[in-house]
Amino acid sequence: MIEGLLNTALVIISIATIGLIYRAVKGPSTPDRVMALDAIGVNLIGMTGIVCVIFRTDAYFEVILLFGIISFIGTIAFSKFLEKGEIIENDRNR
């Protein structure tokens, strides 16, 4: 029964990810696209965790950490770009 619930959860998260991909492509504004990309990262982490439980292994924990780090850095970079217009600041004009 648990495997059935996990498979159902995996399908539901996959459908949500497809909806988020649509939002990332057709979003009405750039902040909506950034939030959709962040939510896609969270969904990938959740799907990888469910796959770990289904396969009864801990081999994918590094992948979960990698998805988390990349998603966090990407969200911070997009937010900084939206706020200031550049990601890496050069302070050579002093």
Image: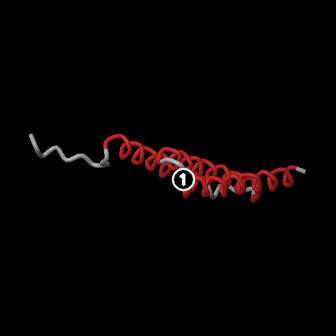
Circle 1 Cα neighbour tier, 10 Å, few/some/many (<14 / 14–19 / ≥20) = some
Which sits in the foreground, 38 or 83? 83
The residue closer to the viewer here, 61 or 47, is 47
Q: How many marks do you count on the picture?
A: 1
Which residue is found at the position 48% from the left and 44% from the top?
31
Residue with the mark numbered 1: 67
Residue extending furthest right?
Answer: 1
Q: Position of residue 49 (x, y in %)?
A: 67, 51
Q: What residue type is labelled 1?
A: Phe
Q: Give the residue furthest to the left.
A: 94
Q: Relative to 89, is 25 above or below?
A: below
x, y percent for residue 93: 10, 44
Q: In which quarter of the image is the C terminus?
A: top left
- With 92 as the anchor, is 15 left or right in this view? right
> Which residue is depicted at the point 71% across and 52% down?
13
Q: Residue furthest front?
A: 28
Q: Where is residue 25, by image quadrant?
A: bottom right
Image check: 50 left or right of 36?
Answer: right
Residue under the point 45% across and 50% down: 74
- Tell me: residue 14, above or below residue 32: below
Instruction: Please say which color scheme the image uses.
Output: secondary structure
In the rendering, at what x and y percent does residue 50 appear?
A: 72, 52
The answer to whether residue 56 is above or below residue 82 is below
Which quadrant would residue 24 be assigned to in this image? bottom right
Q: Nearer the viewer, residue 83 or 63?
A: 83
* Residue at the (86%, 49%) spot, across then down: 2
| Image x and y of residue 8, in percent | 82, 53
Element on which disc 1 rests: helix
